[in-house]
Image (cartoon, grey):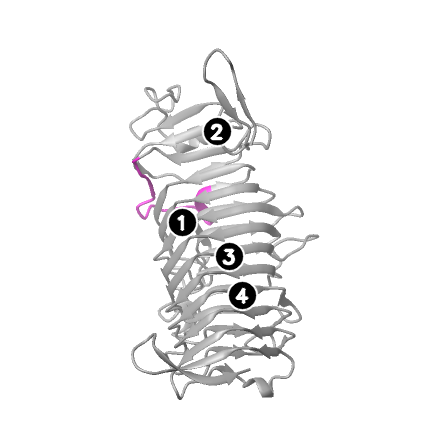
Amino acid sequence: MIIACLSLFIWCIDANAETTTSRIFYVDNNGNDENSGTIHEPWKTIQKAADNTAPGDLVYVRGGIYPELVSIKNSGTAEDGYITFKAYPGETPVMDMNEQVIKKGNSAFFTINANYIVIDGFEMKNLITNGPEYYPNGILVMNQSNHIRLVQNDIHHIENHSKKGNAHGILIYGNASDPISDITIKDNNIHHLILGNSEALTLNGNVEKFTISDNVVHDNNNIGIDIAGFYGTCTGCIDQARNGTIKNNRVYLNSSKKNPSYAGHYAAGGIYVDGGKAVKILNNVVYKNDFGIELASERKGKTTSSVTVKNNNIFNNNGAGLLLGGAYTSNGGASKNIITNNAFSLNDIKHQGYGEITFQKYAKKNQIIDNKFYIKKKSTTIYPVPKKNPENTFKNNKTYFEFSIFPTYEYLSLSF
């Protein structure tokens, strides 16, 4: 950090691009878009601000209801700073469509086709549709957008009730030949979404260098966090989300049981790497989902690889705490992943035979090392058992039997 100060009076400029601000504007739903955008003459709409900002600008949005779908096309820069859209201190701007009819195709409270953008402190709700021709999102980032910060937002009741529908809380959609890169998704609450065939928080396609941290993702009717690849998102590109970190999140109560797209099946993972590569999944708490963590690919001949799953607490999921490999021979697989130092506790609560970890099709060269398993005496730890699974490595894992009241256990001297 470089600080420059004038000697005659205190005036310090932080040279960090993210915090440098050239101008401050204000939006108030009691304002007027013909105003100058000052605190005394605020604009009325967030879209007015989005159309009139430049690198380094900060837009404070006052508390109130904003029935807007905002398109951001103006970019910040590394030299002059981010363009920041931020809740006014102590107030919450609520973006609420109140079930208004929206256009077909993609719709989002914020659609970002720009660089160096911050969205901070908004509540987004009630973007509700019913049809496969609609695609609602809380936040949609697409094309070559980069250096995006999505922080401290509360996103809920984004809904598509169609059996063949799709919806997302946050979607990072790498659909261009150049990657979407440098994405931070932090301290958001993403919940009570009706997702159809999609997921609550998704990075899909040509996306790299991301951090998903300290979010709470819960009570959604499909997958919580999804890192996806090989879906034809882009052409002439790397169609695979990669080189990112998922850490310190709490992911729970994500289940497809009542999702009409899944006909009553328990199929939703808390965290799912579906064709992604080089992802670190660290220090998350993952519980009461259909599955805890899944490493697989739904595209035949494609693989989720080089993923590290470390120091996570995975418990009380309906099926396996961890799934590796495709469910069917028509799927892809999982290889060269490292599963280490995790705690797996009392998963497979629906007694479907998964155990704590299940290996499916095309799961090879994975390492299961230094994990702890807390199970009931008749429960399965790993299926199939390690001695019947020579294509993967098992080392220094320990199993504990439930002794009395969770989490007190009688130690079983078993290491594999």
Which is closer to the viewer, label 2 or label 4?
4
Amino acid of disc 1: Asn
Q: Between 35 and 2, which is closer to the camera in this rendering?
A: 2
Which residue sits furthest top?
Answer: 8
Q: Which residues are magenta?
A: 90-110
Q: In this view of the protein, can residue 297 be seen by the observer?
A: no
Q: What separation in Å lies between label 2 and label 1 (alpha carbons)? A: 25 Å
Amino acid of disc 4: Val
Q: What separation in Å lies between label 3 and label 4 (alpha carbons)? A: 10 Å
The disc at residue 51 is 2
Amino acid of disc 2: Asp
Write the residue at 52% across / 77% down: 397
- Number of numbered callouts drawn: 4
Q: What separation in Å lies between label 2 and label 3 (alpha carbons)? A: 33 Å
Write the residue at 51% across / 24% down: 13
The disc at residue 309 is 4
Mark found first going from the N terminus, 3 or 4: 3
- For residue 146, side relative to residue 291 (left or right): right
Q: Quadrant of residue 345?
A: bottom left
Q: What separation in Å lies between label 3 and label 1 (alpha carbons)? A: 13 Å
Q: Position of residue 378 (x, y in %)?
A: 40, 88
Crowding around mark 2 (Cα neighbors within 10 Å: few <14, some 14 to 19, many 20+) is few
Crowding around mark 1 (Cα neighbors within 10 Å: few <14, some 14 to 19, many 20+) is many
